[in-house]
Image: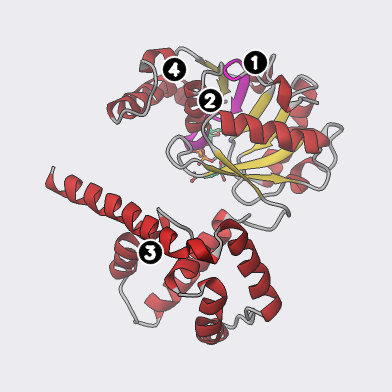
Amino acid sequence: MPDPSDLEPSGTRIATIGGGSIGVAFAIVFARAGHPVRLSDPDATRRNAIPGLVGARLADLAAYDLLDEPAASVLARIEIVATPAAAVEGARYVQECAPEQLPLKRALFAELDRLAPEDAVLASASSAIPASAFAAELAGRARVLVVHPGNPPYLIPVAEVVPAPFTSEATVAFTQSLLAQAGLVPVLVRREVEGFVFNRLQGALLREAYCLVRDGVVSVEDVDRIVRDGLGPRWSVIGPFETADLNTRGGIASHAEKMGPAYARMGAERGQNDPWTPDLVADVAAQRRAVLPLELWEERVAWRDRRLMAHVRQRKTESQT
Ligand SMILES: NC(=O)c1ccc[n+]([C@@H]2O[C@H](COP(=O)([O-])OP(=O)(O)OC[C@H]3O[C@@H](n4cnc5c(N)ncnc54)[C@H](O)[C@@H]3O)[C@@H](O)[C@H]2O)c1
């Protein structure tokens, strides 16, 4: 099993299986970080299109100053092949990015477990299917897990790392190190819940947005406007817990006391009964206070405002060009 201390910053051979939106984007992420990548796709038309697509994305990244070297050097690290067997040869990390279909992932992982070098990690980009559903029967299941990226991962760096109960700690540690070295932000999801965390959060917002449109409260465009010009800019700086913490003097415990009953009524209106109990609020508040003691609250609020000022300035500059 690979050990994180074996990682070479720029020489870990990577295989990406499936060259659609996510496979191509992962190839860019790893090649940009200096790793040699072999990408396989069964569709010949797609294989022929990939070098042009990657070249165009790299040119855009270079135009925005997001590459540390010429685009051609990054492109040269990506080799396109037809089969998983060719892709995984000599690989230490395999990123599967095939369509989101359970039978397909099951068959593909059986093949990858048979073909890949014994010390290679096998990661799936699956958006919702956990590794338990497609790898439980495999001899090498301890090296299998899900790495669910944002789309595209070369711009949205967070990647959910979701081990199954049978995934080894060494597999998780190696994966987190490799992803971090490649400029991603790995976040460990401790249990295999459907949709993991990224899509559950996204889903909570979308479910409410659908209800509000259904009930004639707001138009689709105005929901998007509220996120674009309200929640989005704020969340590009701080997350929802920190928002609540910084929006209320006294921090998140005070926020929960003031706003908890109203949020509980809104949830009940949608048939959801998950009140923020005193124990839960105490746990959340303790986690926030460990990150930000209340004595530093004013300072952090001023920091948030400066970050938002930079954001507003950036948007103003863009609207003028
Ligand atoms: N698109 C997103 O926003 C997003 C985000 C995160 C994760 N994901 C997940 O990533 C995975 C890939 O999604 P995508 O959006 O890149 O899909 P896609 O349809 O763009 O690409 C899938 C690619 O897989 C190839 N393929 C088909 N059968 C294959 C097989 N048996 N073996 C290998 N490759 C095969 C296809 O030719 C195609 O090029 C899915 O599991 C998806 O849920 C997608």
Q: In which quarter of the image is the C terminus?
A: top left
Using the numbered discs, state the Cα–Cα distance from disc 3 to disc 4 in whole angstroms: 35 Å
Using the numbered discs, state the Cα–Cα distance from disc 2 to disc 4 in whole angstroms: 9 Å
Pick the front one: 177 or 266: 177
Using the numbered discs, state the Cα–Cα distance from disc 1 to disc 2 in whole angstroms: 18 Å
Q: Is residue 40 magenta?
A: no
- How crowded pointer 1 is (Cα within 10 Å; few <14, some 14-19, many 20+) is rated as some
Compared across the picture, whether 116 is left or right of 208 comes to: right
- Residue extending farthest front: 295
Residue highlighted by disc 2: 30
Respond yes or no on whether mark 2 lies under 8 Å from ligand 1.
Answer: no
Residue type for callout 3: Leu
Compared across the picture, whether 61 is left or right of 139 comes to: left
At x 56% / y 22%, what residue is drawn?
Answer: 39
Residue highlighted by disc 1: 86
Viewer-nearest of labels 3 and 2? 3
Residue type for callout 1: Ala
Using the numbered discs, state the Cα–Cα distance from disc 4 to disc 1 in whole angstroms: 20 Å
Viewer-nearest of labels 3 and 4? 3
Using the numbered discs, state the Cα–Cα distance from disc 3 to disc 2 in whole angstroms: 31 Å
Mark before the other along the chain sequence, 1 or 3: 1
Mark before the other along the chain sequence, 1 or 2: 2
Pick the front one: 272 or 280: 280
In terms of image quadrants, where is residue 173? top right
* Marker disc for residue 74: 4
The count of marks equals: 4
Viewer-nearest of labels 4 and 1? 4
- Boundaries of the magenta span: 9-22
The picture places residue 221, in percent across and down from the top left corner, at 29, 66
Residue highlighted by disc 3: 231
- How crowded pointer 3 is (Cα within 10 Å; few <14, some 14-19, many 20+) is rated as some
Question: Regarding mark 2 in the picture, which secondary structure is present there?
Answer: helix
